[in-house]
Amino acid sequence: MSKFIKAFLFVPFIALFAFATNADVTVVSWGGAYTESQIKAYVDTYDATTVKFENYNGGLGEVRAQVETGAVIWDVVDVLPDQAITGCDEGLFEDISAEYGNFTPAPDGTGMIEDMANSGVTNLSDCCAPQIFWTYVVFYDPDAFSGEKPSRIADFFDTTKFPGKRGVHTWANGFIQMALVADGVAPNAVYIVLKDQSGAVDRAFAVMDKIKDDIVHWSSGSKPLELVKSGEVVMAIAYNGRVGAANLSEGENFEYIWEGQLIEQEYICLMTGAPNRDAALDFMIHASSPTSQAEQAKYITYGPMRASGIDIIVAGEPWFHTGIDVMPQMPNTAERLKISVMGDPIWWSDNGSEIDERYGAWMGN
Amino acid sequence: MEVDISTVEQILTTDGIPLKVSLQKTERKNKIKAFLLVLPLLAFIIFTFVVPIGDMLTRSIDDSLVNEVYVKTFEEYRKWDKAKDELPPEAVYKALFEDIAYGEKIKIGRTITRMNYSKSGWKSLIRKTRRQIGKIVKSEELPTSYKDALIEINERWADPTFWYSMSQMLSESTPIYYWNAIDRTYDQEANIVMQKKERRIYVKTWIKTFKVGVYVTFFCLILGFPVAHLLANLPLRLSNILMIFVLLPFWTSLLVRTTAWIVMLQQNGVINDVLVWLGILSDEGRIQMVYNQTGTIIAMTQILLPFMILPLYSVMKVIPKSHMRAAQNLGAKPAKAFTRVYLPQTIPGMSAGGLLVFVLAIGYFITPELVGGKDGQLIGHWIAYHLKTTLNWGLCSALGAILLGIMLVLYWLYNKIVGIDNIKLG
């Protein structure tokens, strides 16, 4: 179908919004507590332009629809790492690698790229700026165990030692990496094994088979906390920020199994043809500075992707806005990084769809 | 009696124009007016219904982009004799090098998303290769052997399976997405073969989707029929109150109702608690009623029930009560009178409700996703997945087109068996 017709279809709807939001930088993110923390950390500390946050449900579907029709209304999009890469490949996001030099260096002068490498990230896409680390982590309510409490990721896959159901999400990412760690693969070697050993995925599925009948599957981020709280499951995989919020703000006392947690990156990317490109880029520079990233940890327990951000938090404890120490809930302390799997979005964007389909078939059997 | 029109004398109006012409004139005016009145609606339907669906159907067979980007490569590729050489000849490598070196970055980027679905790994392979080729072109030292150069960039260029997967992309319009949507794919000779065993998900999902649809329709009918009957036969005052009980949930947000069912059905939920309290279940023997297919069917049945009750009610409302009495007067037992006299008259309502519920059920997404757990991935889940996550819009469109096709077939069957004039929605 011709581009013209599509644009014709889109423009009247878009124009309405465009007039209403004229000249504000529009940032699109996931909503909820995460977006609230972004607004407090980045918008409330920024005067150059008005920045407006909108919510979306993730994925590049809407991004591609806007760029294809030429009716771009968003400026910056908060995306998962494999989508940062795919979006950059597809030209949905603008290549800003030439601007990386202008991004705020660490307090000791280390440039942004190196600052990120210091926390283990070397696969930055050319179109995006760093946001936070979030993780898939196993957690449990210590009161649910009278004797020994689970401490290793292998315990999650061992229902004879720790009977009871497990909460797991309905897609594969995070779970298969944990299965490999539970099977004895060193956390930092998980992706090497996945890349180099042809049977690695089969191996992970074999480990997952052990608890297949004891899994309650969840698909929205608040569910695993409800499952553990209500006693429906004894342990669950969750987004670490949700567990941190329950511990810091709702008086829960959940414990984590940090071993084998999958650390994923989160990026903000500049839309191709963004209506307020320059202002948006300036906001991105602000939002990815070490101080801004540390500021965000006052409101949510997702870790700064820039190593210097963590240093600021450590020096400033108690850092959480309620006056409590935040580091015990943070996924990327130096010790925890050693026992964590660092996500490889490049490998995942190659193999993710095949694995997700396989996982769907596995769940349904 | 037939009248031969030609022999009838022409009737003229007062200004001398033949009546026929004059009538035609006013008629045409009216027709234009009527058309202008529906024009906005027509435009609306074209732009919000015909065009998007047409676009979807086009996308489900369109493979022109990859053919545009790799035009030279594919030309050489077709000449490759796979029986003779394990790897393609130098000319294919050279063409590929040039297509990537001088192609538009964005177009190449877009093709790799599509290619990756044929074989996992294309994405990073092309991305890396494009970067390295860019460096080679900049250095102005073109390689003597393009084959060696590419294999040096990435050893996957020496892996024939990548080259074989290219055979799926060779024509500008392709049925491959439809084959993918039923777990089939092409082998290296472009024969249709089954998808890898562990990747076969769609046939199973289609079956699951229909199973849920049939169950939900069946339970809606079983539950909806007596309610609609009661509504139609109670005195107005009572039936109005009862109607509110049907409509109130109907007006409540879908998410609220779905979540409410989780609260009711979960292992530490209301129903299990009551059963344990009554001593019917032991504390360990709590039943798993949610995060599985049972939960999906229960929640969807309750949510779609009004779509069954309302058409049934509107049909039952107009069936005269005297019919049943007359049948019984003539000697039919109540059961016979019901099956022979009442039931046949409700068929239009049952079929309208049934069709409505079934069509809504097979396209359902959010409720099964939330209460279905591992069984909650109906076909809608995979459509959303490919739309948002993998950006494989071809497969996404093919799945949608099949869903549309199935509905059209159902409609056609229905028209054959029951007759579409028998449908009654209100």
Image (cartoon, rainbow, N blue to C red):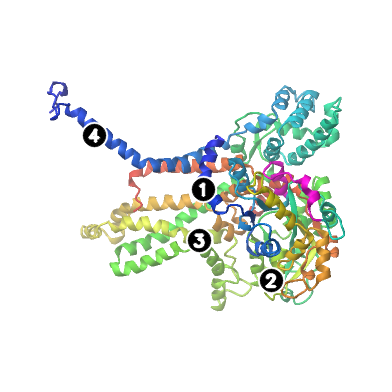
Distance in Å between CA atoms under marks 4 and 2: 75 Å
Above-or-below relation of A20 to B273: above
Instruction: Tell me the residue that label 3 is attached to.
Output: B254
Q: Position of residue A228 (x, y in %)?
A: 67, 69
Above-or-below relation of B278 to A213: below
Residue A330: give its label: none
Q: Quadrant of the N terminus of chain A?
A: top right
Instruction: Tell me the residue that label 4 is attached to.
Output: B26
Residue A13: give its label: 1
Subunit of mark 3? B
Q: Is residue A225 left or right of residue B370?
A: right
Instruction: Tell me the residue that label 2 is attached to.
Output: A246
Of the residues tagged 2 and 3, which is closer to the observer? Answer: 2
Query: Where does the magenta region start and end?
Result: A82-104
Q: Amino acid at mark 3?
A: Leu
Q: Position of residue A89 (x, y in %)?
A: 72, 42
Q: Amino acid at mark 2?
A: Ala
Label 2: element kind: helix
Distance in Å between CA atoms under marks 1 and 2: 40 Å
